[in-house]
Amino acid sequence: MSRVYNFSAGPAVLPEEVLREAAEEMMDYRGCGMSVMEMSHRSKMFQNIIDEAEADIRQLLCIPDGYKVLFLQGGASTQFAMVPMNLMKNRVADYIITGQWAKKAWKEASIYGRANAVASSEDRTFSYIPDCSDLPIDADADYVYICENNTIYGTKYHTLPNTKGKLLVADQSSCFLSEPVDVSKYGMIYGGVQKNVGPAGVVIAIIREDLITDDVLEGTPTMLRYKIHSDAGSLYNTPPCYGIYICGKVFKWLKKMGGLEVMKQRNEEKAKILYDYLDQSSMFRGTVQEDSRSLMNIPFITGDENLDAEFVKSAKEAGLENLKGHRTVGGMRASIYNAMPKEGVETLVKFMKEFEKEHER
Ligand SMILES: *Cc1c(COP(=O)(O)O)cnc(C)c1O
């Protein structure tokens, strides 16, 4: 068996320990003679799995009592519709456009009401987070929506927007559980788990309880109502059982590692290795404005498309996989989520240094 350093933006690297454990439990989960994949979601065994997963994520994020944790499916993209269907009571919401995912969410919300784009960083290819200290927030807005870490462009909010008293809704998919979060500042947080937590398909929503009501937009399908899932403890229908089980294992791994404060330090340390090199390299450079840099997704370029392509190819041959940038941005992108070890980033930088030396004129 040989594992590569996988810099994929998602689905992405998971802790080896978690994968090994899952492999060990594949045929016979804790003496019950079957895999978690084969188990009834109404069984006591599975109830324990989902209960523990919820308790562990609550502990990791210090989720206050007045918030529900829902394990949903349909990926993060389904939330682009569920958010307005459930929360857009006045049919008005404000969106901050910091990249493709925010834009898709904004477009989806426009189907249901007046979705205002109150700020955008599209003028400079989404390479920064706009100043959100004094936005033209609509007096009728039901919420203000952000994509907190922009997976494709490698930007992150380091200060949350001033929502002027309106609810804040955040897509945290690509920074989910990468650092501590003050949940009480949000009406809702959600994350597709395939970036930092588990297998694709599962999305975890953390929602303030008073926002979970039957007062949803007319025509909202049953499966897209938070209340239905909340009342049923995320077991209204068959949930993505195996995915939830893997998420639960990742939560245990995060706890064992020391929790989110420790993860944040580790993530800062890892990102610094790459940013420091980018800042002094004469061949590679980062594409993001310094005050908006993400710890999770780091795009960089040489300025020469052919050289970029050659770099991606030779990096792959050296066991450094999935470094190609998003098709809309080009260049390279290293996604260095929680499960990417420091040695992975060190190996990447070492490889970049050698590549730079070899290609010096
Ligand atoms: C990947 C991603 C999505 C889309 O996730 P799906 O599970 O494919 O729907 C949405 N938002 C962000 C920030 C992402 O990184």
Image: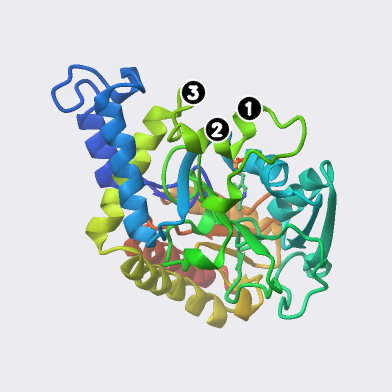
Q: Report the residue marked by disc 2.
A: 228
Q: Residue 82 at what x, y percent from top left?
A: 66, 41
Q: Report the residue marked by disc 1.
A: 222
Residue kind at label 1, given as amino acid type: Thr
Residue kind at label 3, given as amino acid type: Asn
Marks 2 & 1, CB-CB < 8 Å contact: yes
- Disc 2 packing (10 Å; few <14; some 14–19; many ≥20): some
Query: Left or right of 289: which side holds 107?
Result: right
Q: Is residue 78 visible?
A: yes
Q: Report the residue marked by disc 3.
A: 237
Q: Quadrant of the C terminus?
A: bottom right
- Residue appearing at x 41%, y 34% in the figure: 243
C-alpha separation, residue under disc 2 versus residue under disc 1: 7 Å
Residue kind at label 2, given as amino acid type: Ile
For marks 2 and 3, the one nearer the N-term is 2
Q: Secondary structure at mark 2?
A: helix
Outermost residue, bottom direction?
280
The residue lying toward the viewer, choosing from 65 and 57, is 65
C-alpha separation, residue under disc 3 versus residue under disc 1: 11 Å
